[in-house]
Image (cartoon, coloured by chain):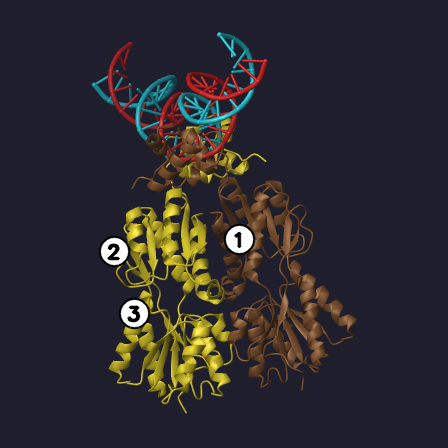
Chain colours: A yellow, B brown, C cyan, D red
Amino acid sequence: MKRPTIADIARRAGVSKGAVSYALNGQPGVSEATRKRILSIAQEIGFNANSAARALSGARARAVGLTLCRPARLLGIEPWFMGLISGFEAELGERSYALTLQVVATPEQEVEVYRRWWGERRIDGVIVTDIRENDIRIPVLQELQLPAIVIGGPGDTGPIAQIWSDDAGAITEAVRYLVALGHHRIARVSGPPGLLHTQNRTRAFEGVCAALGLDHSITIPADYTGEEGSRATRRLLIGGDRPTAIIYDNDVMAVAGLAVAQEMGLSVPGDLSIVAWDDSPLCSLVHPPLTALSRDISAYGAQAARELLNAIDGTKVGNVEAGRVHLTPRGSTAPPR
Amino acid sequence: MKRPTIADIARRAGVSKGAVSYALNGQPGVSEATRKRILSIAQEIGFNANSAARALSGARARAVGLTLCRPARLLGIEPWFMGLISGFEAELGERSYALTLQVVATPEQEVEVYRRWWGERRIDGVIVTDIRENDIRIPVLQELQLPAIVIGGPGDTGPIAQIWSDDAGAITEAVRYLVALGHHRIARVSGPPGLLHTQNRTRAFEGVCAALGLDHSITIPADYTGEEGSRATRRLLIGGDRPTAIIYDNDVMAVAGLAVAQEMGLSVPGDLSIVAWDDSPLCSLVHPPLTALSRDISAYGAQAARELLNAIDGTKVGNVEAGRVHLTPRGSTAPPR
DNA sequence: GCGCATCACTGAACCGGGTAAGTAGGGGAG
DNA sequence: CTCCCCTACTTACCCGGTTCAGTGATGCGC
């Protein structure tokens, strides 16, 4: 089956290719009557502009890229990325931009992928997640002049805009809530220490604990996987003065922590309260359902996509704070016995 | 920063564009010495072929499309899709094909997306998941002559190749295992009844139950979400002769079912045994860990991508059965009390 | 020494849309 | 009536690879 081209439309409308191009793109240079005629012919024969031809003649590729750099077994279970992706799609789909995905193993590979995409003119911009301190991707993006938006921060990303949520405020709220319930020994199981937002959270956690005079507070670094979450939890629970509450940096580790507590015969929330960062269906699925720090991940993604499209259009984009994080109390938190 | 083109290479090598193209693509028409010289220049200046130009001149777009038609909140939590995507990527990345993703709400939108992608020449083929009986996407793909591979089946998809796993064998194994443990009243909570593989599983489940003389077996349809999984489980557990074992069509519903049982004061596996279809970290994360029907989802995805690339290359692709499903016994199954 | 095949390469057309530059025709001002 | 300007187009070339039809040089057989 032959794909219709603007030449087909031009022939049927009795005008030149150029006129059709102007008409379809809303450019001046054709009369309103001709524009309508051309548009209706395009509609009728089901015309879609060949994205390759369009990209070739200097216009946009109408696609943005996303690289995911996490082990496959974690990607699968963590609701975070899929939520983010749905958010991107909501915004991209509306402007008929495509999302190109690449799963990689290391940040070095991410850089390679960016270079390749850029060389191939395959994408107009990229969404950067899991930002690290002195992230090697930032200078490359600057060198290539590739429009980008960084998810996570705040931190130093030079001229590249960031979008972040108020992690410091959120963790402060969670700690205050636990203290109000009567907890004094609060621990935290964090994500990878190299990530910028882990560092921000750790700093805020230590700050609020110091401010409230909690001197048994401790952060154990983990990596977002269930295995590490279990290990960290065991380490915390077999210690002498074990915490009465644990805050986890993601839902997967929180669920793993819950299972460890149950396996050790501890009652949740009686003996141990649990707070999960990033609410997801997973948190309400388990028993007891987990108290969580909720935010609208999908909206977060949508906003990121919107900012990236602005950056691609050449609009100056500044750093933005996304929607608020709020505490959703459920059955996993209570006053300590 | 200017992107290098074959014209740049041609100038530096002192040959014509055509010669460069032949050299880079391994076509005959250039001497081995010239080819080496051209390749090393390409390497040196970091050349990547402009994908738009390549696609425009009749060659491949070197991208495949995937549409996901599930509500965002389910997409996020279900490990299945991400596992599949990692598998695709492993294969596509190797051949430097890109994966273009689109999240949609209805099968009608999927069809629209296929048509648009085809019109835009954006992709060379698509991966079709969640296949239904008389799926509306099949005739469209045939009409557009768009290479495709269907994941799931077996069922009627005309000339489009399918890749499936032996669901019937797996469910038979699970039922026999439960019967061997001493269970007689076995229930199943299924995925959406419209999906082809749900129907295959239901048929097989009923078959084996009839063969083993289990007349209390029942399948309750659900939709893969935790909410529906909970609802179905409650319905099963409050009935008069409640089942002693439940098989769930995905891990999310199984975890939700476990929570419901615990909430109702039933002990798992003492009062109720649970088997989850599709093993995932989720299953080992909860307490007790869930007995599951495991398969290598990532390998499944990789094979699907491989077959699709074959179809794109014009190789005749037949229906293939992917790697075996096997039962992984864990703490959620035991003889009934 | 001639004819012919083969090799290694060149030149130009082509894919399909975007766009700068050119042009016919009509209307209004002087 | 002429000049000029504006509108509504057309023409032609551009983007960067791919590919086909040449072309000159070389080798080979007889």
User: In the image, is residue B245 above or below residue C3?
Assistant: below
Q: Which mark is residue B321?
A: none
**Which quadrant would residue A121 be assigned to in this image?**
top left
Query: What kind of element bears circle 3?
Result: helix
- List the residue tagged with mark 2: A158
Give the amino acid at mark 1: Thr
Say what secondary structure mark 2 lies in. Answer: loop
Where is the C terminus of chain A found, in terms of image quarters?
bottom left
The residue pinned by badge 3 equals A200
Mark number, residue B67:
1
Q: Chain of mark 2?
A: A
* Residue that lies at the very extreme toward the bottom in this rendered image: A337
Q: Amino acid at mark 3?
A: Asn
Q: Residues within 10 Å of mark 3 (few under 14, many from 20)?
A: some
Three-letter residue code for mark 2: Gly
Mark 1 to mark 3: distance in Å? 36 Å
Position of B310 relative to A26 (above/below): below
- A4 in relation to B127, above or below: above
